Image (cartoon, helix red, strand yellow):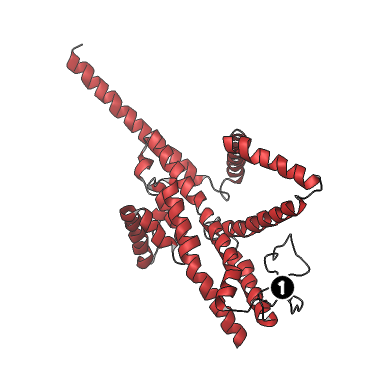
Amino acid sequence: MRDDDWEELLVGSQQVTAQQISDFDHHRRQLRDTLTLYSRPVATLQAFFMGMVYVTYHTTRYILYHKMFLFLILPAYIAWLVMSTVPGPSTDLVEELEFWVQYVVWWVGLGVLSSVGLGSGLQSGVLFLFPHIFKTCLAAQTCQTLDFDSAGDMWFRQSPSLFQCPPENPASPHTPVTFAGMWRKIVLACFLQSAGTAIGEIPPYWMTRAARLAALEAGGSDASQMPEELEARSQYTLINQAKEAMEWFLEQYGFWGVLVLASYPNIAFDLCGICCGHFLMPFWTFFLATFLGKAVVRNSYQSVVYVMLCRYHLAH
């Protein structure tokens, strides 16, 4: 057989192989589309639990063998266990440390729960943060001082002196109630809750990024296809135009685009994370921009507005 014949046969086999791969990808996509809880509940739940077991196993293995866990977290936990068990001068320090760990976990966890559900998460701002701010401002207006306990406003740590007016002590005058003082009283909880919302934006970004990398590695037709959440068309032209504008804005401006979109109350920010994952934006670029936008920029003016609204409501 001549060299030209071998070359023609090789090209033909490559074309057939490429076509077979394309057909296989299309078939797999059709199977994924039919795998829903309503149409195939058993297969869907089986795939879900298998995926959860796989992720849990590999995540646990990664954490246990990570250097930070072995040389920082594990020794710190053992030291805390010893110090909390054996009474001594470090008892007060351990109790203070436990309180602040609980405080951070409480507010950051509420923030994560509010944004991790792709727009359907727990409304922790309405249910927990806003009542906390209102109770803090109400206690300040009632006691005419800021020297009261408000940090212990957590489900698992309710102190008897929470939001209670401190006793009168002529030797040490109370801290007067000022706008800046009230803002400082609530800004840490607002910051931690906002930081939690930034952390809650990681899952949609991470899943979309992983799907895009898997598609690129497989070399199928899905590699350049937009995610279903962005590809779906609405009956309202304005929504479709907003999606297209967001995709263009993020692709053009990257870090600064994410920062702008995260700096105001954006109910469609989950789509921003999906879009960034599809464009394979580096993780730290996405997370740093999201964190600065939500926890620094947006929290700075939102916390001021919260205090203004509470003061206005209490004055009337």
The residue drawn where x is 45% and y is 53% is 288
Q: Is residue 123 visible?
A: no
Q: Quadrant of residue 85?
A: top right
On screen, residue 6 above or below 226: above
Identify the residue at the far right of this view: 87
Front residue (pair 284, 97): 97
190 over 76 or under it: above or below:
below
In terms of secondary structure, where does tag 1 sit?
Answer: loop
Which residue lies at the image location 69% right of the left edge and 53% below the top edge? 97
Residue 128 image offset from top left, x and y in percent: 64, 67
Give amino acid for label 1: Phe
289 to the left or right of 253: right
Check the picture and name the quadrant holding the N terminus. top left
Say few, some or many: other residues with alpha carbon within 10 Å of mark 1 (under 14 / 14 to 19 / 20 or more).
Answer: many
**Extreme-top residue of the structure:** 1
Image spot of residue 125 (x, y percent): 58, 67
Q: Which residue is identified by label 1?
A: 163
Picture residue at 58% right of the left edge, 44% below the top? 44
Residue 8, horizontal then vertical, whole percent: 21, 21
Picture layout, residue 19 above or below residue 137: above
Identity of the residue drawn at 33% across and 53% down: 251
Q: Is residue 232 left or right of residue 69?
A: left
Q: If the image is split into quadrants, where does the C terminus sit?
A: bottom right
Residue 202: give x, y in percent of width and height: 50, 50
Please identify the quarter of the rendering in which residue 61 is found. Answer: top right
Would you place residue 63 above or below residue 270 in this image? above
